Each structure stands twice: as C-alpha cells, then as structure tokens.
Amino acid sequence: MLKMQTIAGAILAAGASFAFAAAPVLKVTKTTTVNAPVAKVWDAVKNFDGLNTWHPAVASDQIVEGSNNKVGAVRLLTLKDGGTIKEKLLGYDPAHHSFKYAILEGVLPVSDYTSTVSVKAAADGKSVVTWSGQFKRKDVGDHPAANADDKTATDTMGAVYQAGLDNLGKVLGGG
C-alpha cells in the first residue's frame, strides 16, 4: 500500500510541476479619463492606422494587408527607436467605440498577445479610455531570461499603455 501511495504521490507531483511549467496568461489594464466627449476621443483613436497620431513611441503606422478598420487588416508599426511590430485587427465595433487586435510579431517581450482599446462616456462630458491586453511572456520556457520573464512582459505593456493614454489625454485636453 505504501508503495502505491509513493507512486501516486510521485505522479501527482510530476503532473503538478508540468502544469506550472507553461507560461501563465498575463493581463494588464490601464485606464484614463480624458477631458473630451466620447465622439472626439473615439475619432482620435479609432483608426487602426493612426496609433502614431497619439502614441509618443510610434513613428509610423501603415496598413500592409487589408483595409483600415476592417477585420483582418494588418498594420506595421515602426517605433521611434527603429523597432517594428506587426498587428492584426481582430474586431472593430464603432457603435461601442472599441477595437481588438493581436500582435503577430515584433520587438515587445510578449507572445500570444491580444488587446482591446475602448472609449466610454463619463460624467461632465468626459470619456474613459481603457487599454487592456492579455498575453504570455515572449520566452515561454521554464527558465526565461531576466529580460523575457513575466515581470518584464507586464511592466513593458503597462508602460506602453500608460504612455499612450497619458499622451492621448494631452492631445485631447488633459488626462
């Protein structure tokens, strides 16, 4: 009996360590209140080929496949430091002022990345902009490098979102 318990324990322990080996799904959400009505804020963020007009790290944003604001469109972001990111539009809902996209490839320390940007009305003619994403770290191995671990992935994406939202607030009248 003791031998069976030992074997069962070993199998459970092996299974548990295997389950933890996979990189976890990470989530980041950043929100800002912009001193502008929803229509004005949505007009500023709605174009899939327009991230460069409000995100300070993006030098250019061009559609390389499909049509702007149509599901399936692919954009190529060129960052001011020369890095690039290719993203695909997964959903576009102008009635609810939101869109969803995925990163196909790029310099960010993430994989399996999807994100949503949405704009909602707030009190006194203001708007709340939410940018949220879920992803895994780029290095999904058991022992990721220090610059490819969960903390790096979440800190980087949090900083990307915050920089964009802060600048959007400045562009549109305070955040």
Image (cartoon, helix red, strand yellow):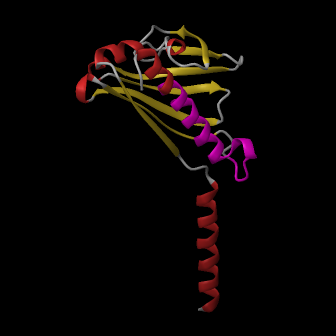
- Where is residue 148 shown, x and y percent of the image? 70, 42
Q: Residue at x 45, y 9 (%)?
A: 68
**In the rendered structure, which segment of residues is drawn in magenta?**
141-165
Vertical arrangement, residue 136 with respect to residue 81, above or below: below
> Which residue is farthest left?
124
Q: Is residue 154 left or right of residue 115?
A: right
Residue 152 belongs to the span the image colors magenta = yes
Q: Is residue 66 visible?
A: yes
Q: Is residue 171 left or right of residue 80?
A: left
- Where is residue 3 shown, x and y percent of the image? 64, 88
In-front residue for pair 33/25: 33
Vertical arrangement, residue 50 with respect to residue 143, above or below: above
- Where is residue 121 shown, x and y percent of the image? 26, 26
Residue 54 belongs to the span the image colors magenta = no
Location of the N terminus by quadrant is: bottom right
> Which residue is farthest bottom?
1
Location of the C terminus by quadrant is: top left
Q: Is residue 70 visible?
A: no
Q: Residue at x 64, y 56 (%)?
A: 21
Q: Is residue 93 left or right of residue 70?
A: left
Q: Residue at x 29, y 20 (%)?
A: 38
Secondary structure character of the magenta stretch overall: helix
- Where is residue 56 shown, x and y percent of the image? 57, 19
